[in-house]
Image: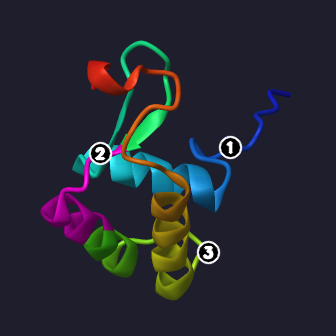
Amino acid sequence: MLMTKERRPATRTIEGWARSVLLETGAIRECEEHGWMRDRTDPHARDRAFLIARHDPPPGVSAERAVAAIEDVLGSIGDTCPECPPDAE
C-alpha cells in the first residue's frame, strides 16, 4: 500500500511567513554581498505587507498575530547591512 506523508507548509514559522511577505512586497531586501535583510523604508510596501497580514494571514493564525509578526520582523531589521562599509551603501 502506498503511504504518503502530509506536506509541510513552505514556511514553518510565523516569522518566516512575515519575512516572505515583506520580501514579496518589497518592504525589505537582501544585501547582495552578505545576505543580511535591509529595511527599504518604503511606506507603500509596508502598507501592502500589513494589508496582506490583515486579509490573508497564514492558516491557523489570527490577523492580529500576523500583523504583530510583520511588526516584529520590521523591528528586527535595520536599514543598513552591518557588514558593508558605510560609504558602500
Q: Which is nearer the eye, 24 or 55?
A: 24
The quadrant of the rendering that contains the C terminus is: top left
Q: Residue furthest front?
A: 87
Nearest to the observer: residue 39 or residue 12: 39
At label 3, the amino acid type is: Gly
Q: Is residue 43 magenta?
A: yes
Q: Give the range drawn in magenta.
A: 39-49
In the rendered image, residue 35, in percent from the top left (x then y), is placed at 49, 23
Residue at 39% of width from left, 72% of height from top? 53
Residue 60: numbered disc: 3
Q: Is residue 18 above or below residue 68?
A: above
Bin the neighbour count of mark 2 within 10 Å (Cα to Cα): few under 14, some 14-19, many 20 and up: some
The quarter of the image holding the N terminus is top right
Q: Nearer the viewer, mark 3 or mark 2?
A: 2
| Tag 3 secondary structure | loop
- Which tag, 3 or 1, sits closer to the chain's start? 1
The residue sitting at the left extreme is 44
Mark 1, other Cα within 10 Å: few <14 / some 14–19 / many ≥20 = few
How did the renderer colour the structure?
A: rainbow
Q: Are marks 3 and 2 in contact (CB under 8 Å)?
A: no
Asked which secondary structure carries label 1, the reply is loop
Say whether residue 46 is magenta: yes
**Residue on which the image places disc 1:** 8
Q: Decide which of tag 3 and tag 2 comes sooner along the chain.
A: 2
- Prevalent SS, magenta region: helix
Q: Name the residue under label 2.
A: 24
Residue drawn at the location 58% of the way across and 46% of the way down = 11
Closer to us: 78 or 47: 78
For the residues bearing labels 3 and 1, Cβ distance under 8 angstroms: no
Is the Cβ of the residue at disc 1 closer than 8 Å to that at disc 2?
Answer: no
Please give the name of the residue rendered at 76% of the width and 34% of the height, measured from the top-left corner: 4
